[in-house]
Image: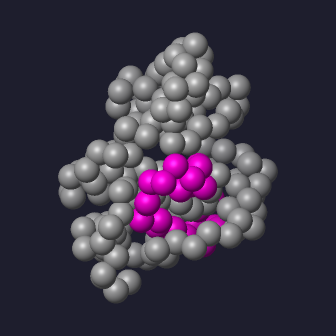
Amino acid sequence: MYDCVAIVGPKGSGKSTIETILAKEYDFHKVVSDTTRKSRPGERDGVDYNFVSEHQFRQHTLNKQYAEWVQARGAYYGIRKSELMYKDSVVVVDLEGLKQIKGTGIKPLVVSLKAPMVVRWYRIHGRDNLRVFLKDTLHFWTKSIKPDLIFDNFGSNPHKIAKRIAIKFIVGGNYAN
């Protein structure tokens, strides 16, 4: 039995797309992370992120409310344990975050997405520069994880991938990949 779905993969592999489909079509709870950074145009508090002060973030950390947290690009980001305990929750997380989540005793169904590098670069070229993209790619593939499911998210229908994830989650691991 799984507590949540954790989607991992390098930048541009389609993690957010699968997360959105699971939330919209299969009624999964999309986990909303806390952050101390300022909101960007179009972002909504409680939808895209929970925008909190550094003081609030520190309090949540001291009270051990986060399943995982990290400081990146001058801000803090964290996922509350309570967010992961919703029925059928789904989260996009990096490998370090996945390790922290597993360390809390929460049992995620780990889904790893992959896609050819040229396709991933095409998908994200407006968001990151090439150096950041290559560093992320190298970092992801040099870490060892044992995912429960692996999907090549290139030339595949993301709705079919989401359906297979939902089925595996619901039957608790008794579904053949």
* Residue 89 belongs to magenta span: no
Residue 87: x %, y % from top left:
25, 50
Which percent across, then down, holds residue 121? 63, 59
**Residue in the image at 34% along x and 46% along y:** 85
Q: Nearer the viewer, residue 15 or 100?
A: 100
- Furthest toward the bottom, the residue is 176
Which residue is found at the position 30% from the left and 72% from the top?
172
Q: Is residue 48 above or below residue 8?
A: above
Does any portion of residue 85 appear in the rendered image?
A: yes
Q: Quick check: 109 left or right of 122?
A: left
Q: Residue at x 47, y 21 (%)?
A: 51
> What quarter of the picture does the N terminus occupy?
bottom left
Q: Is residue 122 visible?
A: no
Boundaries of the magenta span: 97-122
- Relative height, residue 127 to residue 27 (above, below): above
Question: Which quarter of the figure has residue 61?
Answer: top right
| The C terminus - image quarter | bottom left
